Image: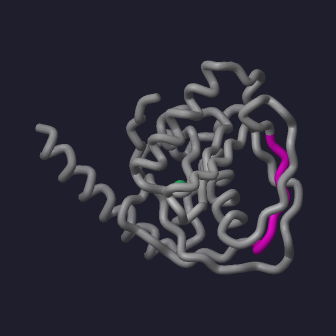
Amino acid sequence: MSQRKIVIEPDPILRKKSEMLETVDDELRALLDDMLETMYDAPGIGLAAVQVGILKRLIVIDISKDKEKKNPLFLINPEIISSSKKTSVHEEGCLSLPGHFAEIERPAECQIKFIDYNGKEKKLKADGLLATCIQHEVDHLNGILFIDYLSKLKKDMIVKKLIKHKKELDKVIL
Ligand code: ZN
């Protein structure tokens, strides 16, 4: 397993739509393992492949609070098949928008179908933090970031700060 570099907004790749996968093989599983390691190290609770620069419909999630008991969820070609009318608000952050958080309202529950780590088709009903996390990550596969739900003013302010942050990172590298 090896860690991958996380893409930081603004970056045009984060706005692209990811592609469906045809087969689940060892190469794909190695990528999922890398994504999981990258996510744990960050640390974060969800990561989409586009965030490591790969435009494939792949997501890793682990919302377990206990670090000793890891409970990773691998979603290949996830698709939201239904969502509740009832909504909930969670404070969201994103590994591609380091240091920024905002309260986002989304459907409180959702049901998805996906392919698992072993290539099996599965369905999952989610609520609470998991439902929010799944919707946030599926948004990534469609080129959507949580800041897109904010006012233009708030969004512009965050992007401006991220540009400054990226310039500072470049200085360190030079
Ligand atoms: Zn994110």
Which quarter of the figure is the C terminus placed in? top left
Nearer to the camera, 26 or 142? 26
Nearer to the camera, 80 or 145? 80
Q: Is residue 118 left or right of residue 92?
A: right
Q: Main secondary structure of the magenta part?
A: strand
Q: What span is in magenta?
A: 107-114
Picture coordinates of residue 171, whole percent (x, y): 13, 46
- The correct choice, above or below, for 9 with respect to 149 in the image is above
Q: Quadrant of residue 120?
A: top right
Residue in view at x 64 percent, y 45 percent: 141
Residue in view at x 52 percent, y 66 percent: 147
Indicate how the structure is coloured in the image. Answer: one colour
Q: Residue furthest front?
A: 68
Picture coordinates of residue 82, whole percent (x, y): 88, 61
Q: Is residue 143 left or right of residue 42?
A: right
- The correct choice, above or below, for 167 with respect to 118 in the image is below
Q: Residue 93 magenta-drawn?
A: no
Residue in view at x 18 percent, y 53 percent: 168
Q: Is residue 62 visible?
A: yes
Residue in view at x 50 percent, y 39 percent: 13
Q: Is residue 142 visible?
A: no
Picture coordinates of residue 161, whole percent (x, y): 30, 64
Picture coordinates of residue 72, whole percent (x, y): 63, 48
